[in-house]
Structure formats: structure tokens, C-alpha cells
Amino acid sequence: MHFRRTLATALATGLAVSALAACGSSSGGDGESDGEVIEGAEAPEGATPLDMWVFAELHADVYDDMAVKWNEENPDRAIDLNVTVYPYQDMHDKLLLAVNSGQGLPDLADIEVNKFSNFVKGDNPPLVDLTEAAQPYVDDIVQARLDLYSRNGKIYGYPTHVGAFTAFYNTELLEDAGIDYTTITTWDDFAEAGTAYHEATGKAFSVSSTGVFFTEPLAIAQLGGQLFDDDGLGDVAVNSPEVVEAMQMFQDMQETGALATIPGGSPDSEEGYGAINNGDYAAIVYPAWYTSRFVDYMPDLAGKVAIAPAPQIEGSDTLTIGGGGTGTAVPVGSEHEELATDFLAYAKLSLDANVAVWEVLGFDPVNMSVWEDESVTHNPDNKFNEYFQTNLFDVLNSVQGGIGHFESFSNENLPTVDNWFRTVTLNEVYENGTPAQDALDQAQDDLQNELGQ
Amino acid sequence: MKSVLYSQRLAPYFFILPFLLTLLVFWLVPVGRSVVMSFQEVLYGQSTFIGLDNYERLWRDQVFWTALANSIRYMVLTLLLLVPIPMVLAAIINSRIGSSRIKGFFKASLFVPALTSVVVAGIVFRLMFSETESGLMNQVVAFFGFGPVRWLREDLTGLFALLLLALWRWAGVNTMYFLAGIQAIPNDYYEAASLDGAGKVQQFLHVTLPGLKPTIVYVTTISVYGGLAMFLESFMLYAGNNSPNNQGLTIVGYLYRKGIQENDLGFASAVGVVLLVLVLAINLTQLTATGTFKKESAR
Amino acid sequence: MTLQRTTPPPVSEPTLDARPRTTRRAAARAQGVLLLVIAMIALVPLAAIFVGTFQDGNEIIRNGISLSVDVSELSLDNYVMLFTDSGLYFQWFANSLVITVVQVAGTLLISSFVAYGFAMYEFRGKNLGFILVLILMTVPFEMLMLPLYVQVNNVGAADQYWAVVVPFLAQAVTIFFFRQYFLGVPKEILEAGRVDGVTEFGIFFKLVVPIAKPAFAAMAILNSMLIWNNFLWPLLVLRSPEKFVLPIGLNTLLTPYGNNYELLIVGSFFSLIPILLLFLAFQRFFIDGMTAGAVKG
């Protein structure tokens, strides 16, 4: 090791002096730009600089607001927050490389739930234990969402939203087809309405996504199943009866024309927004944060969409689960671990933070005290309230006791399984018409091989 | 000092020193490291030797074989496209008939795509191959009376898009290589063949083709390299490393997914080692069989 | 392999072509049409992106790009955005320019150096050395990217421009081209220099480099093209957005969370301009240079 290092250094200095001199000068100042690096308000003198990486520009706005409030409330522990927005894939790749090498780490980072397991592998994960700092808030927080980012009883990331699955119905289209969405409670109702809609209009009622593995886990959880054995904590088990039943249910719906694939592979893609905005699909079952996509990308549907509880499995206690999500973490090795942790708890779990999550992002906040504050939730000037016919929080409160945690989402092998479904299995089932059982048996086989289980 | 500067014996070593250093630091050391890591499990800087486990997993790994098959398929098909077509185009450009202005324009337009980065080319092709009716390629098939094709969702149409992208970007460059090669063939050969009563096609087969052998070897070598190592084209076309049924996944894509996206550096290194062995085996065989080594070292 | 080959041999008038003129003219016309058609097809993607710069970015992502345009929907909004509200775009542009210039200069110097050593001297291990060059040409960088990346991190060079540049200064393909060229340089020049008391390096810089100008010009263009468009390695090394080079920067615009599609299209189009200008200005050098360095018997 020492030998290599010496050589590389020698080469670097010897060969590259001229190149260095020329390049170095142009690399210039940090954060002087006004583009991707988003500067919060002027930080007070002596504030501790904290670097943060995120992958969604809007998240940065919330953190900046929270940094300002933090500095007002904690003048002695002021921070100078520098949020950098990277593209989704790049940010996770870079962060993974950074924690691996211990070089160039940020003090705080957003990690998307499907990537989270990559960062908490092994017994000694490179993320700071955040359990302590969460204590003041923990009673108000949806426990399932803390579990999602916990391993061995320690919290390694704070959630951004619940992401409870809800249903979005385009009432204009449904009325034309003579369908009343309020009569839909179970998946059977959903399938029936879908078939009727398809027969009436020739169009698909809802979406079968091949690019995201989202709605299926909801049904699996409602059926009481998991993607891994040992209640979701063990080895891969994607051909278990509940998984097969759920996949079969969606495949049947696809066959009757109730579901169809969507351009872009999922409702959460630019092509998908276009299709939904065009009225090509009448119902979307997606996490609550999809409100923001409607408001931002489907202006033509303003006033035409109703939010309702997600379809259920009859007799199941699990009414909905959280889908997607972002866990914010503090990488081990940050110079200001403690300060970063305390700020993060405040910026993610406090009441103020959660009001901002709703008002700025339109997400369903994890702090449930927000859900009960009518002045916030039913504010008529809120752009999300203006857009939708029904109120998101009415829907959330109606399922509050039934928000389940899907253990499989915290399995360390979730990224591999998720990837497998998104590239292979969902295509087999929805595109190639492979019977669900066969596709899942195959997936089980291949995944066992890939994971060495 | 003085004698050093004037020494003919030492000078060549000074000249090739940068190369030796590069070779050592940026080639041999990484290769060695790759080999070592391929026998390890690497987690957050802690490495444990696990023997041949990574290679065993690789052997049983369905996705790896898919990726390997995709890369080989792509390599073979690009060879079939990017050697003969540019060769014929070069022969046409070099022919005595036709306007030189048109030929000049042709050369430039064929070459310009090579100036675009994979990023830009990938974005444009992705948008051209959009599955909506209004995408360019679907307008083309509609012109011939066919319905919209979901280009990037199906294996063969996706492959078609990748091949077209490769052809578009590299046909000009290869044509230029072949043109250079053709122009290096002495004119007397053609005249002699002409005197023997050989027609244009026969001249091409019996004079041009043999004369182009070194160019063919060179183009084939870089195409094998480019074909097996293809990654970015697919990465951009599919807007990421995931494609339906992994139809766009290549060996390097798999290496990237495992090593950089899933943090399994040991396993990814094993993928890299296999790829290295594969490329070296193909190209060394080829360069030996065509006598390139012997010739080059005899200079 | 001789220097004379750098320009195409004069085309001698056909003496034995007995076919009537009209047939030849028809053949020429057919050939012209064929070449023009192929050239047009080759330009379609570029035309499409050019048209796209006047369209709404989100619409393009939703509906794909095409050549059929509703003229009333075209606007200059994207250009306005590019020049007023493009964030780091021009910073990336500048970074790319600097990196390209520095790296091209470095590559030419180092690679020509190495090629000269191989072409002009006899020394132990020369054959082995050159075979190593050939082998290096056949090994894709992608295979080495992981260990190389780890290595760069270990020396603390992540996010440093020199780590982007240095590993590729001794570029095998460029060495190969230069060597071909130098082999055609008469050795008498070297002897004359030595008699005059010039150092070995002096001979290279003062006597050989001036002769090899066309090769330098051609390699400058070829390398500029590669480096200007370089993506994967800078992507791994660079971390701060303000240090990104253009292709990485453009790729970052392709994200569903940013809503930057307008800038993506117009930015992609703009990124073509410097390299296109370079090519058009030096097209003749370039084609000659390719000829000069091409592999021959």
C-alpha cells in the first residue's frame, strides 16, 4: 500500500505540475455559483459550515428554511448550511464511493429508501446512530417510518414523509364512464371498476408499472406477506403464496384491460405525467407524495382529481403502507457529527419541519401532530388543497391506525430484489404475459443465485 | 549532467519514462488490485479474503451471463456493420467518378456525429426512439404504414437503436481509416489489375481488400474493444443502468452496477477481471494470427 | 509508411476506361444521390436536436423529438434561459475548455515524447515495450475504473482536476499514431543535430517537432474530440457541481427532480459548437492527419 501511494504521489507531483497549476486555478471558490449549490440565508458570524447532499431540488428549499429557523433558536450553535443538489443516481453513487473511501464526505445526506440498505450493510455501518437525538420527537412520529431506516434497533436515518399509499381518481373521466370512485374500497372493487371503465371507454383504468416496484408491495403487505422469509428479515422469498397472490391479482387486472403499462414505465416519469395529464389513465394508486407530481406536472387536471384511501384487502389490518421515501443520514467521519445530528433531528422531526414538508413539498409529514392541526391541513390557500377535490389529511386520518411497516423494505437485500423486479419480473408479468407463479419462481431462483442464498 | 543530456544510450529511457510510469501506476497496479479485490469481500474499507467465492457467484449469476451475451452480441453485430459498410463507403469516395464537392460534404457529414458526446447522442437517440407516436422513429414507421413501436421496451428494437447509434457515431471515423488505407495502396496495382482485364468489383476484391488488411486489423481491434466495453451508449439510451429484462445491460454496465451502485467491489472486480481476460484473449489471438506483433517488433 | 502518404496520391486520369461517357455520367449522378441521401440521414439527429432547442423541454421528454414541428409553438425561451438563468452551465463550459486545452497539450507532449523514444532509438526492451503499447490499446479503461478510482481516493485526489487528466497523458493510440509518423522522419536529421552538438531533447524539440506539425495538428483535433466529450472518468472523480465538465453537467440536468429539460436540450446543442468549429476550421488537417497515422503495411 505504502509503495503504491508513494508512486502515485511521485507521479502526480512529477508529471502533473504544469497541468495542476493550470487546472487548480480554475477550480476556484466553493459555493460561489448560484446554480446547483443552494445557499441559505446569510449565516451568522462564526456559524459552523455543514455540507449536505440531496437529490431533489425542493428538499433543499425545506432544509434551507429549517437552517434559518435553527439559527434563530440556537444562536450559540449556528450553522452555515450548504446544500448541493445532485441527480438521483449520481448522488447515491458518489455517496457510496465517499463512505467507502472516507474521502469527501458531506455532513448530511438524503438517501432514497431503495438505496438505503447499501449504506447500512455489515455490523459497522458508516452512518451515525441517530436514536438519541430522535427522543424528543419520537412519540409523534409514525413508527413504521422510523423502523424503515433502523437496523438492529438503531435509527440511521430520519424519514421525510410517510408516503402512505392513496388512490388518485380522475373524477371527470370516471363520471363519463358512469363510475363512482367512492364505492371502491377493496382491490376487488377496484378491479371491477377497472373492467367496467375499460369496457365503457376502451382505455386503461389504472397503471401497471414495469419501471417501479411500488404498488405490488402494498398488496403483498395487505395480504400479510413479505419478500423475504423470517417476516421480511431473512433470505429472499419472492415466490411465497402472498407474493404470488398479489402479482396474480394485478396480472388478472391487466388481462381484463383494467390495467395497462404506461410510457416511461411508471406514473412517476415525465412520459407518464404526459399520459396521465392527457387522460389516458383514470386511477393512480401511489404514495401520498404523488400530490406534488399532479400539482407540478399535470396542470390540466386541476380540480378533477380526488384523493381516496388505497384499495384494501378485505379483513386485513394493514390498510396502507409507506411507499418510497428518503432517509436523511449523517455519515460517520463528518467533522461535526453531533451538531449535524441535532440539526437533522430538528430539521426532519420537529413540528415546524413537518409543516414545511406539507406546505412546500405537499408530502404527508411523519409528525402526526400536523395531521390534526386543521389550520394547516385545511388551509384553503394551500396549492395542494386547491388542486384536489378531497383533502389528503382526511384520507390519512381515516387510515391512521392501519399504516403498516413493510419489514422487507429494510432488508439489506432489498436493493437487489427491487432491481430484479424492475428489470425482469415486472416485465415478464406485465409485458410478456408470463404467469405470475412462473415469473416469481424464476425470480426466486435467480435471486438466490445472485445473493448466494 | 552534460553527458546525460547527450547520451544516446540513456535518452530513449527518458523518452519512454512517462509511458513506463503510466503503465505501472495507472495500469499494472490497478490490474493487480482488481485481481486481489476479486478474491475479497470489500466493505467500507475492510477487506476479507474469501477465496474464489466471487467467481463462483459469477459463474452461477444469471444476470452476468445476460450481460456477457449482450456485450458479445453487440460486439459481433457492430463488427459486421462497422467494418464492411465504411469500407465500401471509402471505396465509393475514392472512386474516380463523382463530384468532389459532394464527396467532401459527405465526408464531413458522416464525420460530424463522431464529434457529439455519448451524453448528447444518447439523449437525442432516446428522444428519437420515444415510444409515443410523435417520436421521430415512430413517424418513420408510420410512414410505412406501421403502428407505433415501443422501441426501448423490446429487446430487438432496443438493440436496433443501440446499433444505429453505434453506426451513426462511428461510421464516419471508420470510413476515414479505410479511406486512408485505400489511398496508401499504390496506383500501379490497380493499373496492373486493369491491364489484366479485372473489372471494378474484381479490383476491389483482389487489390483493395488485400491492401486494406492492416486497416481491417486495426479497425477490428478497436471495434472488439469498443464493442465489449460498451456501456455509456446503453446507459444514456435507457436513461440509467436499468433496462427491461436487462436487455441493455453490458458487462461494464454490470461492473458499474455491482461496484459503484451496489457497493460490492469484490464481486465487481471479478467481473472486471473476466472482461479483461476476454478482451486480451480475443485481441492477442487476433494480433498474433494476423502477424501484427511480429511485424511491429521487427521494425 | 512514408510521409508522402499524408496527402492523397494524385488521381491519375483513367486511360483504359472504355465505357461511354453517358454511362459514367449516370453512374456519377447515382453515386452523388446516394452519398447525399446518406449524408442527410446522418445529419437528421443533429437537425432534430436543433429543432428541439426551440421547443418546450418537458413536451419533448413526454412526446419524443421529431422533425415535424408546429411553427407557432417554437420560441426562443430556451435560449433566453441559457443566457440568463442557466445556473452553472457556462461554468461547466469553461471547465471543459480549460481541461480540454490542458489535457490535449499534455497528451501531445507526453505521447509524442514516448513515440519518439520508440521510433528513433534502439534499446533493450524496446520490442517488449512496444508490444505493451499495443496491448494497452486493446484494454478498455472501463475495466480499470474501479481500482483506479480506489487508488485516486487513497491518494486524496478525488474531486481534483489533475486526477482527471494525469492517468491519460500517455495515450496509447496517440503514441501509436506519432510513432508511425516519426518512423517516416529521416534519421539523418538526428545525426546532423548530434554533429552540431544539440542535446537529444534539443533534437526532438528543435528539429523533429517542427517537421511533425501536421501530426500534432491532427492529434490535437482527435484528442480534443475525445477529451471534450469525456464522461465516465470525470464522473467518478469530480464531486462538486462547480467543478463538473460539460457532459457530466448536462447529464445532471436529466433528472426528474430538477425540471431542467429546457436547458438540457439547448445545452446539449450548444456543447457541440466548440468542437464543431474546431473540426470545420481544421478539417483538412484532420483528414490528412488520420491518413498520416493510419495503420499501414
Image: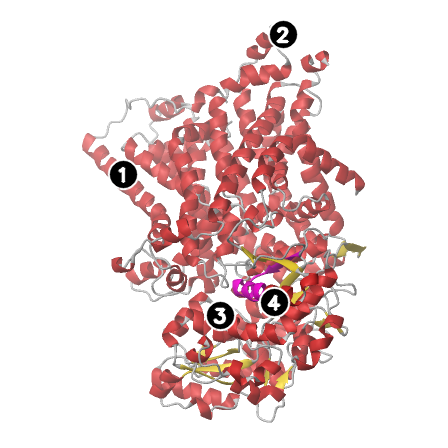
Q: Which amino acid type is marked by label 4?
A: Lys
Q: Classify 10 Å Cα crowding around label 4: few (below 14), some (14-19), many (20 and above).
A: some
Residue A279 appears in the figure: no
Q: How many marks?
A: 4
Q: Residue A62 magenta-drawn?
A: yes
Q: Classify 10 Å Cα crowding around label 2: few (below 14), some (14-19), many (20 and above).
A: few
Q: Please, is residue C124 above or below residue A441 in the view?
A: above
Which element type, helix, strand or loop, lies under badge 2?
A: loop
Output the chain of dot 1.
C
| Image x and y of residue A257, in percent | 42, 81
Q: Which amino acid type is marked by label 1?
A: Gly
Q: Mark 4, mark 1: which one is toward the viewer?
A: 4
| Closer to the camera in the image, C260 or C212 | C260
Q: Which amino acid type is marked by label 2?
A: Gly
The residue tagged 3 is: A268
Label drawn at residue C32:
1
Q: Mark 1, mark 3: which one is toward the viewer?
A: 3
Magenta segment boundaries in residue numbering: A48-66
Q: Residue A182 magenta-drawn?
A: no
The residue tagged 2 is: C197
Which element type, helix, strand or loop, lies under badge 3?
A: loop
**Which residue of the protein is positioned furthest toward the left in this rendering?**
C22
Residue at x 62% of width, y 28% of height: B294
Q: CA distance from mark 3 to mark 4?
A: 32 Å
Which element type, helix, strand or loop, lies under badge 4?
A: helix
| Mark found first going from the N terminus, 3 or 4 | 4
| Image x and y of residue B282, in percent | 61, 43
The residue tagged 4 is: A69
